[in-house]
């Protein structure tokens, strides 16, 4: 039986939820988080699509994951299961490397000038022995994404 892996990442940002959502709810926003390591291709018909305007429960499009912006390393078949306008989404997709990929992102307001962005990932690799490697790669990628979010929107030091 295939093993399911789960990872979670959270950042406290010094920018209001609406402003953060205006960026993270778009493919250019996703690619800004992934840069410079990865880029997700987007068909022209979906280039300006905002998550809250997307269809749910049916494939939106297929995307190449491009290492360094040019080397194809995976093919992702994007499908959204739920959308909470301005607050988050649940993506349930597949890819060449993942039999099942679930990405839950929430953007929770913390007053007018701050928010918390959380990503919860659950995935089942297509090739079981690749699981530990994919945990490392996906973990590194989402830690990078959250560093990019904190750099762009400012971080709140929760240890203080």
Image: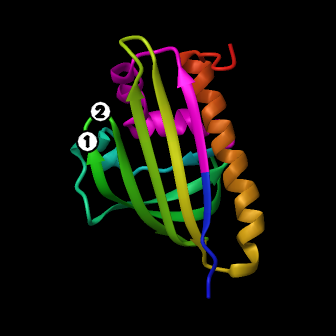
Q: Which segment is the magenta one? A: 8-37
Can residue 13 be seen?
A: yes
Q: Residue at x 67, y 46 (%)?
A: 141
Q: Is residue 19 magenta?
A: yes
Front position in the image: 109 or 140: 109
Q: In the displayed structure, would residue 72 be above or below residue 104?
A: below
Q: Position of residue 39 (x, y in %)?
A: 57, 45
Tag 1 and tag 2, C-beta contact below 8 Å = yes
Q: Position of residue 46 (x, y in %)?
A: 31, 48
Q: Residue at x 33, y 35 (%)?
A: 87
Viewed as shown, does residue 9 lie left or right of 47?
Answer: right
Q: Position of residue 37 (x, y in %)?
A: 69, 42
Q: Is residue 2 magenta?
A: no
Res. 21 image quadrant: top left
Q: In the displayed structure, would residue 17 be above or below residue 133?
A: above
State the quadrant of the C terminus: top right
Front position in the image: 78 or 120: 120
Viewed as shown, does residue 98 lie left or right of 113?
Answer: right
Residue underneath mark 2 = 86
- Per the image, label 1 sits on a secondary structure element best described as helix
Work out whether mark 1 precedes mark 2 in sequence or the reverse, and give the earlier one.
1
Q: Residue at x 73, y 55 (%)?
A: 137
Residue underneath mark 1 = 52
Q: Residues within 10 Å of mark 2 (few under 14, many from 20)?
A: many
- Per the image, label 2 sits on a secondary structure element best described as loop
Q: Residue at x 71, y 71 (%)?
A: 131
Q: From this viewpoint, which residue is outermost toward the front? A: 160
């Amino acid at each position: 039986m295939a093993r399911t892996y789960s990872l979670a990442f959270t950042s406290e940002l010094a920018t209001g939820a609406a402003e953060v959502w205006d960026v993270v709810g778009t493919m250019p926003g996703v690619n800004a988080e992934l840069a410079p390591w990865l880029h997700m291709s987007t068909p022209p018909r979906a280039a300006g699509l905002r998550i809250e305007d997307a269809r749910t429960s049916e494939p939106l499009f297929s995307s190449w994951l491009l290492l360094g912006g040019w080397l194809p390393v995976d093919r992702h078949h994007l499908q959204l299961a739920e959308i909470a306008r301005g607050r988050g989404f649940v993506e349930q997709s597949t890819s060449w490397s993942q039999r099942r990929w679930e990405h839950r992102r929430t953007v929770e307001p913390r007053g007018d000038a701050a928010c918390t962005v959380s990503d919860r990932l659950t995935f089942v690799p297509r090739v079981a022995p690749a699981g530990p490697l994919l945990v490392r790669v996906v973990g590194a990628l989402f830690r990078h994404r959250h560093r990019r979010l904190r750099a762009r929107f400012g971080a709140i030091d929760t240890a203080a």
